[in-house]
Image (spheres, rainbow, N blue to C red):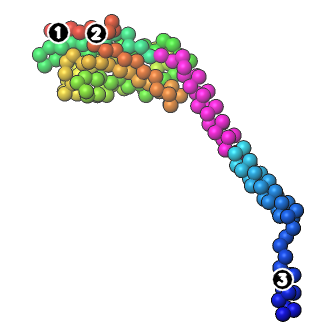
Amino acid sequence: MDEVREIRVRLKGISPLIATVIVLAFTIAVAGIVGVFLTGFTTSQTGSVGTTGTKLTQCASSALDIDWVKIYCGTGIKNANITVSYATGSRSLSNITLLAVSGGNTSRIANQTEMQVGDFYSWYLNITSSNPLLPCPVDSFRVTGLCLNETTIQAQCDKGDACYTQIYS
């Protein structure tokens, strides 16, 4: 019986003061680990957003313009003459692509490697050879380019706009 009492005496719990200190130390350690993680995470995210923001700011003034579209529709003939200019901006544009949109179909009909500010480019196209399925007249022409290889700059000229002239022969 004395052994039982002796075991009970030895199995006393820790004092409330020591328990409080241990819980506090654990909480501070976890808070420190979370703080270090969040500091690194926010620093990397801020850097990423800053880089993207800088690129967008540099490309913000870029504007392509479809100066005019002349489309010739006749029996077996579908030709288009399109002039595009890059008058405003501070960066060159790459991967210039001319798209024709008509009847729910979009067709890439021409490419240009690069345009500098002040450049203009004129395409004379046989639409029949580019895409025989496109009806004449084409509903819309769209030109796109990439500023700093990421930000898309585009212009569009729709049938009925001042830039669009349709000629039947």
Res 94 seen here: no
Q: CA distance from mark 2 to mark 1?
A: 15 Å
Comes first in the chain, label 3 or label 1: 3
Q: Residue at x 87, y 81 (%)?
A: 9
Residue under the point 28% across and 23% down: 101
Compared with 17, 164 (above or below) is above
Is mark 2 in CB contact (under 8 Å) with mark 1? no
What range of the chain is rendered magenta?
40-63
Under circle 2, the secondary element is loop
- N-terminal-most mark, 2 or 1: 2
- The residue singled out by tag 3 in the image is 8
Query: For this rendering, which residue is in front, 116 or 102?
Result: 102
Please state which amino acid type lies under the numbered disc 2. Gly
What percent of the width, then of the height, locates residue 13?
83, 73
Q: Is residue 43 magenta?
A: yes
What secondary structure is found at the residue carrying circle 3?
helix
Mark linked to residue 168: 1
Task: Name the residue at 28% across, 9% down.
Answer: 160
Write down the residue under mark 2.
160
Q: Secondary structure at mark 1?
A: strand
Task: Give the residue at x 32% y 9%.
Answer: 161
